[in-house]
Image (cartoon, coloured by chain):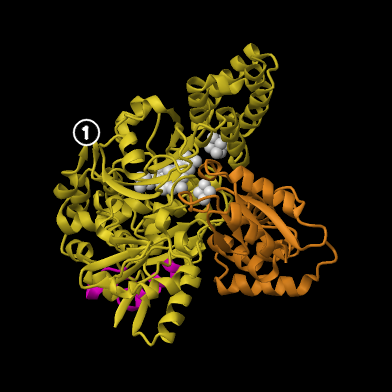
Amino acid sequence: MSQTPASPAVETATAIAQAHGNRPDALLEMLHEIQHRLGFIPEAVIPALAQALNRSRAEVFGVVSFYHDFRRQPAGRHVVRVCRAEACQARGGRETEAALQQHLRLKTGETAPDGSVTLEAVYCLGLCAIGPAVMVDGKLHARAEGKRLATLLTEVAS
Amino acid sequence: MIRLFVPRDSFALALDADAVAARITAEARERKLDIVVVRNGSRGLAFLEPLVEVDTPMGRMAYGPVTVADVASLFEAKFHEGGKHPLAHGRTDAIPFLKNQQRLTFARCGLTDPLSLADYQAHGGFAGLAAALKKSPADIVAEVTASGLRGRGGAGFPTGIKWQTVLNAAEPEKYICCNADEGDSGTFADRMLMEGDPFLLIEGMTIAGLAAGAREGFLYIRSEYPQAIATMVRACELAQAAGFLGQSIQGTNHSFSLHVRTGAGAYICGEETAMLESLEGKRGMVRAKPPIPALEGLFGKPTIINNVLSFAAVPDILARGGAAYQALGLGRSRGTLPFQLAGNVKQGGLVELAFGPSLRSLINDFGGGTASGRPIRAVQVGGPLGAYLPEAALDTPLDYEAFAGASAMLGHGGVVVFDDTVDMGLQARFAMEFCAVESCGKCTPCRIGAQRGVEVIDRLRASENPAANLALLKDLCQTMTDASLCAMGGLTPMPVLSALSHFPEDFQPAAKAAE
Ligand SMILES: Cc1cc2nc3c(=O)[nH]c(=O)nc-3n(C[C@H](O)[C@H](O)[C@H](O)COP(=O)(O)O)c2cc1C
Ligand code: SF4
Ligand code: FES
């Protein structure tokens, strides 16, 4: 990703690592913070983190790619995470996922071409007694079906 | 002044509790009423959330589920004085769902402001720590052993034995790790506890630190639980400031500090050795055992790893004695388990009970049957690696051994109900798909086997060569069971084979349709 402005991202990453005392065991915390600030984990921060933590680039890259949370590309302006796990399936979760796909014209895992929204799978949000569960930009929604889902869909579209 | 309670638990937040609380505050101001809104934890009656409570001379009265649109009519009905309203349920503690439980671990959850140390102490908090501070490490462990407590994370390993192993280890540096990865679908007890009674977990982990001689602890919370993370971080700060964490706990020469760490969306990091790798800042790859984590755990040091509910059971055990806890339960399953009623159930939520009642009683007496009103067809107990049980197996008592005897597992106590519209072939396919997505990739039977499993089930469901594909599926399951390094690959066959043996008709929908 050569268009990524490398140095501000690297500066951010280095500062975050330093705030954690460059402790290698805090790598996940650092990556969460970097993603929170930059929206994703730009390629350029990997060698910078490797150097700061005294780890190989391959190790840092391995961590970034192992965990579902870390993005290597920016997400849409809105992120919709739909629960695909069993307890939600039992309450119509598959139908909720299909409705979201249809409404957003996306498959689960895709970002809209105009960068407006990303639809993602999540496996349980801990709301299993009152599913189907959806998270929109970090906010939880339970009973996401029928009228509540319709309201949610209009909010996501705007 | 009138005290009103609007939960800050995720159940309530996901049903607009913040807006309800704001509306109540605004409405009270307009009506010039002197009220204060406390943001409590959840009482576990998820089906009534947001459950608003009012402190009255008759006790705490419950109203729910409350929406923003209901607030004006609640004030009209004088709910702030316990008045009658269509959403009224009378005294909260008299609601049968709650009244018929045996709450130990969750005794305080929902009663208090989770971030008030004064509230916590007024409701018996830190009594366990006070007792532990007067005991030797060996005596603390002896109390936990006497309680019969077994790990609540799934495997049911005796907690006292684990603690004894770490206590006996000669290394000066030891760690306490709490597993709050709670990835199993159908479970939310860890989340509710962290959001609703965070000091209890801190107290339990601190007692473990005293018992093992560890001065540092890590709490690994899944990233899907932002509310729990925020609550625990704040609770640790408050506990530290009040001398319940950090140097010289309560003026003694014991020290214990606690770090909250966030997972990153990997189910396998709930497996304890993968969690340790993750806590060390690495990929969540499962370690081969031995060495066991009790001897070589975090950073290679002796480590106590327990589930949230295991640690949270400990303060009560220290405060009232192991024998009182041990007196509850059935067979070798002692004490209580916070069951979680989920899926297609009318009254879902948290039900803490002593081991022993039947699965049927839990689902019918507490859950009120299915939410859809249709007949129950299958129940999955113990998370995504747990068996699917048919209606006929619902009389199995809730006890670790009885479930093992029924080729099933209680696991973390999650109970997911499905009605008769469920397609069990699709559920089996999902079990394989989930394993393929979440496998750590270390061993072939799990990584490749799960992918093959999805394909074979697809062919079966398309009625391609049924006899051969059925044999292939069983063979594949056998290989996964026998040759996987951990229970992810090793137990995925459990939901698949239980679905296949109890609901064979769902694996050949094409043939069924042709009949
Ligand atoms: C695939 C897999 C996922 C697991 N997920 C969790 C989990 O989310 N939480 C948990 O406490 N234990 C989980 N466990 C069990 C842990 O490995 C371990 O047994 C447990 O944390 C020990 O604590 P306990 O003795 O208090 O139960 C999982 C095990 C496996 C194989
Ligand atoms: S069984 Fe699966 S999750 Fe477990 S170690 Fe093997 S590949 Fe990893
Ligand atoms: S299964 Fe969807 S929230 Fe738990």
Which tint was used for chain B?
Answer: yellow
Q: Where is residue B269 in the image (x, y as percent from the top left)?
A: 51, 48
> Which residue, as the protein is rendered here, is positioned at the far right?
A3
Name above or below for residue B7 compared with residue B175: below
Residue at 36% x, 39% y: name it.
B363
Left/right placement of residue B72 relative to residue B117 reads right
Task: Please indicate, yes or no, whether residue A40 appears anywhere in the rendered image.
Answer: no
Q: Nearer the viewer, residue B322 or B164?
A: B322
Task: Please indicate, yes or no, whether residue B219 appears anywhere in the rendered image.
Answer: yes
Count of marks, rendered view: 1
Residue at 15% x, 56% y: name it.
B320
Label 1: element kind? loop
Chain name for mark 1: B
Image quarter where the N terminus of chain B lies is bottom left
Q: Position of residue B67 (x, y in %)?
A: 48, 66
The reply to whether the residue tagged 1 has its Cβ within 8 angstroms of ligand 1 is no
Which tint was used for chain A?
Answer: orange
- Amino acid tagged 1: Gly
Is residue B241 magenta-colored?
yes
